[in-house]
Image (spheres, helix red, strand yellow):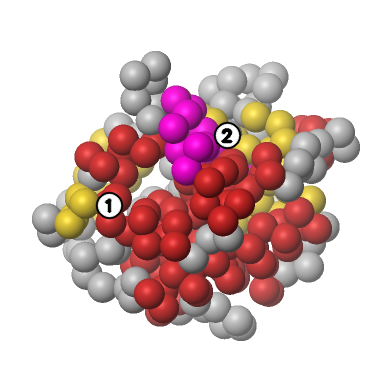
Amino acid sequence: MSIYVVGSSKNMFPELDAGREKFIVDNPHEGDNIDRLNKWYCELTGLYHLWKNTDAGYIGLEHYRRFFASLKHEKQRMGIEEAQEILEKHDIIVTEYHHGPRYTALQWFKDSSRNGISYIVYLQKFLEVLSEEDRVGFSEYLNRHSLIQCNMFIGKRPVIDRWCRFIFETLSKYDKICPPTENNIRMNGYLSEHIFGYWLEKEKVPYYRVPKVEIEYIVRQGNGPVTIGPA
């Protein structure tokens, strides 16, 4: 099992157990990579490298301050053996985000913006590159009050291979009609995590939802003091 725990060079990581490996998204990496696109692809920089450069039968992605919670100890990280037990009956482990009873992901895109440009503009461009079936299905999925999010998973290799082929091919098409700029930083990552749950359901992938445990994060501002804040 190979799990990339992603973060930037400004982040401090907790001690990682066997099976988990630190992936610094803004550092250069050997092998097939999309390092140049990190400002837009975020965690997907790690996912792409994991997909192209490892051959483990089970692969996963977590964050430097956000992990899957153990089902035995809800405030502790899930151990590798526990994840393997779950994956004996399911194809992938995911986590769910709840927007609340009166809010949806679609509304989040409408309410969010960067440099005066609403995120809904980028979502509409993304919808243009989807098939008609996916355009309709994903639009309906965005109106739910909860969805699979965070670009986090631990899953069987064949499933992740299928997901990676779909999302990176789709984002490549999206980049052609909406090229990366300073205005849409992080957008590819946002789009990916929002369509992930829809794709799992459409592909009828047996998934298992697990709560996430978040830890305090530490950010180092250049050579200055260390700042500690809530997750």
Q: Nearer the viewer, residue 34 or 73?
A: 34
Q: Residue at x 26, y 36 (%)?
A: 229
Q: Residues within 10 Å of mark 1 (few under 14, many from 20)?
A: many
Mark in the foreground, 2 or 1? 1
Tell whether 27 sits left or right of 61: left
x, y percent for residue 174: 44, 69
Question: Is label 2 in a helix, a strand or a loop?
Answer: loop
Instruction: Tell whether position 206 is magenta.
Output: no
Instruction: Tell me the residue at 73%/62% (across/down).
Output: 161
| Residue 224 in which image quadrant | bottom left
x and y, in percent, of residue 230 in the image: 30, 32
Label 1, secondary structure: give it: helix
Task: Say if residue 116 shows up in the picture.
Answer: yes
Q: What stretch is highlighted in magenta?
A: 139-153
Q: Which amino acid does label 2 sit on?
A: Thr
Question: Outermost residue, bottom direction?
Answer: 31
Residue 149 on the magenta span:
yes
Q: Farthest residue in the top direction?
A: 101
Pick the front one: 191 or 12: 191
| C-beta proximity under 8 Å, tags 2 and 1 | no
Q: Of the residues shown, which amino acid type is indicated by label 1? A: Tyr
Marker disc for residue 95: 2
Residue identified by numbered label 1: 119
